Image: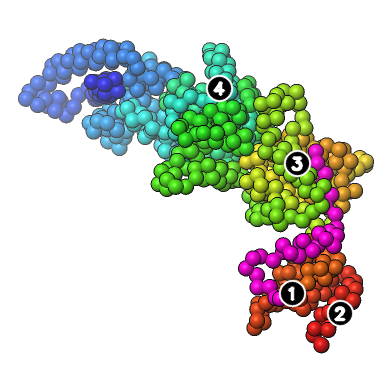
Amino acid sequence: MSAQLDWNAINERHLASAVKWARLRLQQLAPAETDHEKKGGLFGRGKDARATTNDAVNLELGELRQDLDKLEKNTPPPALRHLADVLGLSAFERNVLILCAAVELDTRVAALCAQAQDNPNKPYPTFALAFALFDDPDWNALAPHRPLRYWRLLEINQTATQPLTASALTIDERILNYLKGLDYLDDRLLPLMDPIIAAAPDAPLPPSQQQVADYLIQQIHAANGKARIPFAELLGADPASKQAVAMKVAAAFGLSLQLLGLHNLRAQSGDFESFCRLWQRESLLMPLALYVRADAAEKQLLQRLLERSGGMVFVDSNDANAEALRTRISVDVGKPLPEEQRQLWTDALAEQAGDMPQCLSEQFSFNQDQIKRLAATVLTGASAEPGKPLRDDLWQACRIAARAGMEQLASRIDAKADWEQLVLPPEQIALLRQITGQVASRNRVYDAWGFRERMNRGMGISALFAGESGTGKTMAAEVIANALQLDLFRIDLSAVVNKYIGETEKNLRKLFDAAEDSGAILFFDEADALFGKRSEVKDSHDRYANIEINYLLQRMEAYRGLAILATNMKNTLDKAFVRRLRFIVDFPFPGVEERKQIWQKVFPPAAPLGPALDYQRLAALNLTGGNIHNVALNAAFLAAQQENGRITMPLLLNAARNEFKKLDRPAKESEFRWLDAQEA
């Protein structure tokens, strides 16, 4: 017989004996003489027979008491004994609970209750009945702070005019099932909580996370014996890593973890009080620990919860701001270190790893579960299609997984441009290739060559693209993203900048935290709107505006990916910010030769070009690359509406004339005489 089956048998025997003991006590309390006894009794036995019966009941009660005491010495003890111990029930309170359970489990007990109270309308237990029934009655059991009422073990069905002692008592359904050996989370808590279950419970944590878990275990062990152990505040941006550490700590104490989102919890006093008491009761009856996830807006509710909750509590926080009367243990929990991620990739990919773990760990930042899941998914697909390149599939899967948190504050640019399409002077091309090379080899320089150990800031790669609108700044960012096979995100300033104090920094923090995981390229278009000069502090608005710029300076320096700022007003940027940029690339207005190359490359191979396009004449038009793209596209639409469907010089010059008008720029009519001659 297994240990669990053995315990179930012992618990059933213990509960049955307790119920029988309560029933026999009720029989003793029944009226001394029944109608039959007054008439001589059934079969003529009368009072002598009743006296004999009482002696037998007393003997059986003594045997039951001995049996209960013997069973309660079992390890672990029966449910009733364990409940009484952990919830602090006195002997009298425990007997009251047994009486209420007996009514539910033995159909004869309700009638005996009515008979014992000499009232057929009272087939239920009451405190008054318990006072008469059990030895050493304790009036304190009625107090709201005593276990029976505080822990909601009983429900008191009291009417407006009925005294408390005469009101019907019923045992809580959850408690009744607990006594029967059915251990589950209270139904009233289920809608508010979710169990946190590890995909691989026995899998070891990465060393850096295991070190944090060991520290928490040591601190909690040191707090044993105190009235309340400290709560653990887990700081960091990755919830999965924090949950993994919390599960490891809880498992060390034999506890399972339950997740509570404070947004599910009602703040009204009655509902909040009920939740706190039910959770405390459950955490004592079951091996449970609480994992609370809260944001800054729920700080006050979190504080109330921590003050009311006992047991082991973990708080998922981004900032150290969970104030409470309870002492805390604050730790930083991050994703596995790059070398740990490399080992995780190696283990997950097994014999197909090759040099992929090095490349993936250098570019992306994933937690342990994400690495295992991504590797398993890609390997399954590879086995289904043996001819597909594993490296490309794995890299693409990582890009998709890493961009998940970026969509709210940034929009992804589908990078299509390559080096062949980019037309710039050699100096600018060389700078762009240098930027690309630094991003590709940054981990080799920082980690393998030890530069990270010598530097405490400025390891982020940042570049300023300055030039008029349409000179190729966005295309250059696309070219770099394509060369590195990375995602390119344009930052939506309207979603980042907030008029409320402190909100802009919060949005930027979310943005950079999400971008850190993917190493994505951040593209701040019209950056002068966000990175303007710091002003002299004349009021609180100036002070907080400067704080925003200072925060940006810090995050840009710390960001491990590439951040590109684009502006057509370079002089408006803060000088301190410009000084900290690693690259500044000036995008000049294209000259005639550059414009000719742009015209030659602007048309896709499938575009139906007319005969003898005069690229030299087109290059004479004083337009930027962006304007040239608009002209070519508009001319293509004009051609699509004509019978021959070909892009010709007249259509291009006509579209160019409209582009000049749109820009409100004067155009030399000599440039369009050829068009006029053709139309004539």
Q: Secondary structure at mark 3?
A: helix
Instruction: Please say if the residues under marks 4 and 1 sit with CB atoms less than 8 Å apart.
Output: no
Q: Secondary structure at mark 4?
A: helix
Q: Secondary structure at mark 2?
A: helix
Instruction: Please say if the residues under marks 1 and 2 sit with CB atoms less than 8 Å apart.
Output: no
The amino acid type of the residue labelled 3 equals: Gln
Query: Which residue occupies the foreground of this view, 379 or 611?
Result: 611
Magenta range: 582-611
Label whose residue precedes the other's in the sequence (3 or 2): 3
The amino acid type of the residue labelled 2 equals: Arg
Label whose residue precedes the other's in the sequence (4 or 1): 4
Q: For residue 246, say whether it is visible.
A: no
Label 4 crowd (10 A; few <14 / some 14-19 / many >=20): few
- What residue appears at the point 54 percent right and 25 percent down from the top-left corner? 206
Q: Would you place residue 526 above or below residue 509 in this image?
A: below
Query: Which residue occupies the foreground of this view, 418 or 13?
Result: 418
CA separation in Å, label 1 and label 2: 17 Å
Q: Secondary structure at mark 1?
A: loop
The residue that disc 3 covers is: 434
Q: Would you place residue 381 above or below residue 337 in this image?
A: below
Instruction: Please say if the residues under marks 4 and 2 sit with CB atoms less than 8 Å apart.
Output: no
Where is residue 475 shown, x and y percent of the image?
A: 73, 54
- What residue appears at the point 27 percent right and 36 percent down from the top-left corner? 120
- 419 relative position to 368: left or right: right
Instruction: Please say if the residues under marks 3 and 4 sit with CB atoms less than 8 Å apart.
Output: no
Residue 612 is labelled as 1
CA separation in Å, label 3 and label 2: 44 Å
Give the image quarter of residue 30.
top left
The residue that disc 2 covers is: 673
